[in-house]
Image (cartoon, rainbow, N blue to C red):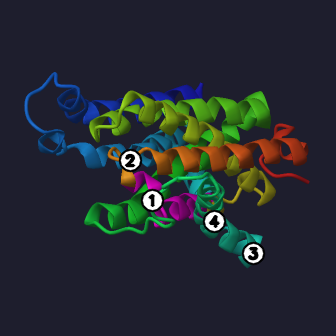
Amino acid sequence: MSTTFYFGVAFALTWLSLLPPSLAALGVLSGAPETYMAAAPLAVFSPAIAAILAARREGGWASVHTMLRGLGAWRVGPTWLVLALMLPGLLYVAGRAVYALVPGSDGGPWVYLPERPEHFGAILFVPLCEEIGWRGYALPRLIARHGARRATAILGVLWGVWHLPMFVSVGMTTTQVLAGVVLIVVGNVAYTWFFRRTGGSLLVAVLLHLGSHLDNPSHALPADSTPLFILTAAWTVLAIALLALDRRAFEGTTVALA
């Protein structure tokens, strides 16, 4: 199956490139994880590399071109583009506002803008490289085979597990790793919703992912877990609302909704 090849390549490239810093973070290798990050950029590009290889294997360069064409899907209109870009930050602010109502709570800053070079690098490369793979290649094929609801669950779990070595290599605790995986699984519900409601726009998926890096509470990790927990709770509420209020978006086996 084509998606099996895609996931195999994406996981292999990412996990192998991040194995040394992960082992260092776990104390198996001596030295700081940062000293083993030479191959880490490969992890960022691996979903796009895997998607291009899988699409090329599946239908030649014409299939690759069809997959990448979604990056130019401006036809969805400015409202969807702005909503996708702003939603992650608005969600965190809403969750932080609710948390502020708890007596004696200290949730930290309300906004986590990029500060370090790696933050800006993430904004430039991570959304594009990941979304070419997850939403550009994998999601349409999973929907066609399993239906939108099951495809969302499958992709959410695999996307979350794919991130494990990234979480471990930066020193996240077990609780933080579990919360990070849950965040990705529930957040994936919104990605499917945007993708289907915009006729399979890969551009919208990239903007939604980019918005997560414009205001990224994970910058507080591993020292402070509270922002991550707030963010996870906010995305969970959104996922439940979307599944309950727009069931049609998670039904059927076509990418676009009629």
Residue linked to disc 2: 224
Residue depth check, mark 1 versus mark 3: number of the one nearer the observer: 1
Residue linked to disc 1: 108
Determine the secondary structure under disc 4: helix
* Amino acid at the residue labelled 2: Asp
Q: Is residue 177 visible?
A: yes
Residue 246 relative to residue 80: left or right:
right
Q: Position of residue 248 (x, y in %)?
A: 90, 44
Between discs 2 and 3, the one toward the N terminus: 3
Specify the segment rendered in magenta. Answer: 205-219
Residue depth check, mark 4 versus mark 1: number of the one nearer the observer: 1
Q: Mark 2 near mark 1, Cβ–Cβ under 8 Å?
A: yes
Residue depth check, mark 2 versus mark 3: number of the one nearer the observer: 2
Which quarter of the figure is the C terminus placed in?
bottom right
**Mark 4 to mark 3 CA distance (whole Å):** 15 Å
**Mark 1 to mark 3 CA distance (whole Å):** 31 Å
**Pointer 4 local density, CA inside 10 Å: few below 14, some 14–19, many at least 20:** some
Specify the label residue 79 is tagged with.
3
**Mark 4 to mark 1 CA distance (whole Å):** 16 Å
Q: Position of residue 129 (x, y in %)?
A: 45, 53
**Mark 2 to mark 4 CA distance (whole Å):** 20 Å
Q: Nearer the viewer, residue 254 or 53?
A: 254
Between discs 2 and 4, the one toward the N terminus: 4
Between discs 4 and 3, the one toward the N terminus: 3
Q: Position of residue 174 (x, y in %)?
A: 39, 28
Residue linked to disc 4: 90
Determine the secondary structure under disc 2: loop
Q: Nearer the viewer, residue 2 or 7?
A: 7
Residue at horizontal 38%, vertical 53%?
220
**Residue 65 higher or lower than 46, as above or below:** below
